[in-house]
Image (spheres, rainbow, N blue to C red):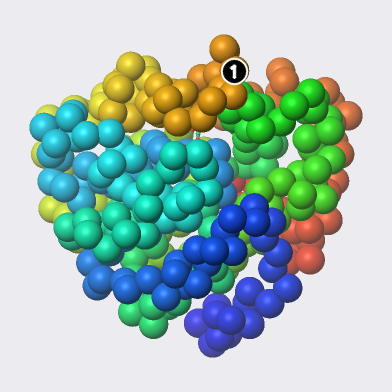
Amino acid sequence: SRNIPLSQMWRGSWCSLIPTFGAVLDKILQLEVRSDDVFLVTFMKSGTTWMQEMAWMLLNDLDYEQGGCLHLTQRSPFLEAQGTRPNSGNEIERCNTLSSPRLIKSHLPAYLLPQQIWEKKTKIIYVGRNCKDVIVSSYHFIKGVGYLSDSNLEDYVNHFIKNEIIYTSYWDHVLNFWKIRNEPNVFFVTYEEMMRDLQGVIERLSEFLDKPRLKDEEMQKLLEHLSFDKMKENPQTNATANIRSKISNVRENFQFMRRGIVGSYRDEMTPALQAKIDKWSAEKLSEHGLTEEDIF
Ligand code: A3P
């Protein structure tokens, strides 16, 4: 990938955005990037929050005290959220005033991120997650926060594969980063790998962030802190209450920390629906000489 200009790799990529993004896109593209910034980029519902807590802890030398009294959304801004959701803060302004090192979360595709990232070779962490779990997780999320009326999962899949859901095209998003995964400033990981070997991911990420190797007891404490159950009961990482307080139509049964497993699509999608997505994915990936197994 090194010989191909990045701009060429992204030609033809698609991203569906909500109209209010237009107002902030220029500001995002022009954001002043600092040399020690770390960007955490994912397609939505790919394990962003899990990785965000891990990366924040490593970047801040395991500061459980600060992490225990400030919500993750306060410690790490969500770049494009500015003005796009009811009562969301001015995230770009917050980025500008936040002390370093900044951990900035975004679901935007590569070519809509601050341009200086590519000039300064700023560190980027990218988390990918298999397509069918992303669809199931995002369906429950978007429905749960009241942005999908009576749509069922099958309708949602049809919109998703036609790139009509926010942030789609899913495959363009993942492939943009898959192609640059070996660049020294890019840390590419999957939700599936985090599930298989969280300790290995923490070790690899520490090295990427130029942090010293964790002692055994530090590692054990961090692994426990990052477990699904602990993050679910932790008010500073579980965003359920935060989202309920900000969005008025949230459904009664909405849970931000939902199942936290690989393969939840298996008992939530009919075999026919799974096959439809698999066919669509295989076609898209074959254009790049890839299969899903190459990535996840
Ligand atoms: P499910 O809806 O499949 O349960 P994001 O942070 O990108 O919005 O991703 C949310 C998904 O990550 C949800 O998936 C959520 O349950 C899962 N998740 C969050 N924290 C996790 C953790 N500590 N361990 C495993 N999965 C986690």
Residue farthest toward the top in the current orientation of the protein: 252
In the image, residue 221 sits, relative to residue 111, either above or below, namely above
- Can residue 180 be seen in this snapshot? no
Residue 236 position in % (x across, y down): 28, 28
State how many labels appear. 1
Residue located beneath label 1 in the image: 251
State left or right for residue 285 relative to residue 259.
Answer: right
Identify the residue at horizontal 56%, vertical 71% (top origin): 111
Query: Residue 156 sits in which quadrant?
Result: top right
Q: Which sits in the foreground, 168 or 178?
A: 168
Which amino acid is tagged 1?
Arg
- Can residue 12 be seen in this snapshot? yes
Identify the residue at horizontal 57%, vertical 13% (top origin): 253
State left or right for residue 165 relative to residue 3.
Answer: right
Q: Which sits in the foreground, 98 or 1?
A: 98
In the image, residue 65 sits, relative to residue 129, either above or below, namely above
State left or right for residue 121 relative to residue 178.
Answer: left
Residue 173 position in % (x across, y down): 61, 58
Identify the residue at horizontal 37%, vertical 53% (top origin): 91
Q: Which sits in the foreground, 137 or 195?
A: 137
Residue 72 position in % (x across, y down): 30, 38
Binning the other alpha carbons within 10 Å of mark 1 as few (below 14), some (14 to 19) or many (20 upward) gives few
If the image is split into quadrants, where does the N terminus sit? bottom right
Q: Which sits in the foreground, 275 or 104?
A: 104
Q: Ligand 1 within 8 A of label 1's CB?
A: no
Query: Residue 129 sits in which quadrant?
Result: top right
In the image, residue 274 sits, relative to residue 57, either above or below, namely above
* Element carrying mark 1: loop
Identify the residue at horizontal 70%, vertical 64% (top origin): 14
